[in-house]
Image (cartoon, rainbow, N blue to C red):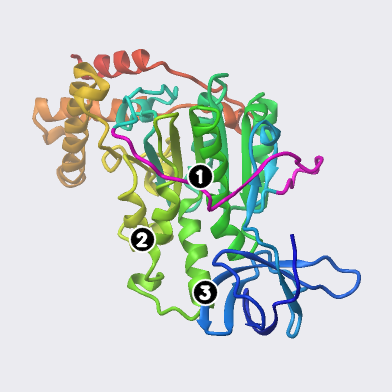
Amino acid sequence: MSGAVIGHVTSIRGLVCLVEITGDKPELKELLQVAAPPGKPSAYIEVIGYPGPHTVRCLNIAGSTAVRHGADVTPTGTTVSVPVGKPVLGRVLNAFGNAIDGGEPIRGERRGIYDFEQVFKGATAKNDMLETGIKVIDFFAPFVKGRKIGIIGGAGVGKTVLTSELIHNIAKDDSKLAMFVGIGERIREGQELHETLTETGVMDRTVVFMAQMNETAAMRSLVGISAARVAEYFRDDEKRDVLVFVDNIYRHIQASNELATSVGALPSEGGYQATMFSDLRRLEDRLTSSEHGSVTSVQAVYIPADDLSDPAVQEIAQQLDSTVVLSRSVAESGIRPAVDLIRTTSSLLSPEIVGERHYKLAERAQAVLQKYESLKNVIAIIGKSELSPAERGDYERALRLIDYFSQSFHVAEVLNGTKGEYFTLEQTLKGVEEILQI
């Protein structure tokens, strides 16, 4: 509901504008309506700060050209909101919750994206394992309900393909509801994902939020929060277990960094914004479980320049329970998925969660792979024939393990013509036992 004019735009710098207030001061995060020239739609800007007693700083979220110097501004009394419930299933939405799939506008209840109550009442997760059908993940980085798993890698090593395969294998279960959040990725990838989900019959149980690389930093920084609000509704109001796939969480930090630069904030370590930790936690703390249901998230993490020590990558890794590291050198050797078995880690790989058999197998496999890493340099110098029989045996077992964890994906069938494979956890464990001769 709009009211009387309360001010006008006095300054514009990129997506950030200043509004001189002549009426009542608007609330933080409130949307203000900017009067547009004749024949153009009105624009909405979000209050993000108060630099002076009669001035508010606002964000032109969609980058509308209607925001111009001298334009009149009126209050709306609302914040950014998104539709919730069954009407959003099978739809593709933007950060404002508006349909961008060419379908009918979504009608029904809407919830403000900042309206949530985070209440923890003790433990909410029961360490229930979810089988993914992907050998390397089920074995080295178990997928546990209500936890977070990261797929870390540089450009072109297979993060999106691995994420798509996880969606294909897990979301086809009728009891689970899936959400995909695309942050700053290619337009083509969003189109291909939509086609894949539709062809595999998963789209009807999936909600897709997209803010692609051609959109403003504000839209890219906001889309994750909007998706989290919908996930919270399904978790708390409908008491559902929700799977949230984020591609790419690094772009969330990157978008927030762009906005920080726009308002003149001084950068911190590595050129990132000083608020990087809080920007990330604001989203991560909402992708969690409650006493009503669970939110399990898979987050693809781009590594700039393949540098795992990048401050943003390190910050993201601290929020994750498991990290699957994709390696360019493994990808170049022709192994898919290109998982670095040594650097892939999980805090969930414990006897209490996966059981004694799985835990001991994983320990033995990791020991063999570590031995393989140390022997590679020796073999490069003196050759494999100079190894002791025991060392040669470990080296051969490691090679077999590396080859065993390669796998054909269902979502890649149309690209390589190879039929996709699904392995149960029991099949995976038996296969490792045969290789290790346990």
Q: Which residue is mark 1?
A: 246
Secondary structure under badge 2?
Answer: helix
Q: Nearer the viewer, mark 3 or mark 2?
A: 3
x, y percent for residue 412: 58, 32
Q: Nearer the viewer, mark 2 or mark 1?
A: 2
- At x 35%, y 22%, the residue is 128
User: Principal SS element in the magenta part?
Assistant: loop
Whether residue 189 is visible here, answered yes or no, is no
Q: Amino acid at mark 3?
A: Gly
Q: Which residue is mark 3?
A: 49
Q: Which residue is mark 2?
A: 277
- At x 15%, y 33%, the residue is 385
Cα distance, mark 3 to mark 2?
Answer: 20 Å
Q: Amino acid at mark 1?
A: Val
Tell me whether circle 2 and circle 1 mark residues in contact (CB < 8 Å): no
- At x 16%, y 32%, the residue is 367
Q: Nearer the viewer, mark 1 or mark 3?
A: 3
Give the class, few, some or many, for how many residues have Cα within 10 Å of label 2's Cα (few <14, many ≥20).
few
Secondary structure under badge 1?
Answer: strand
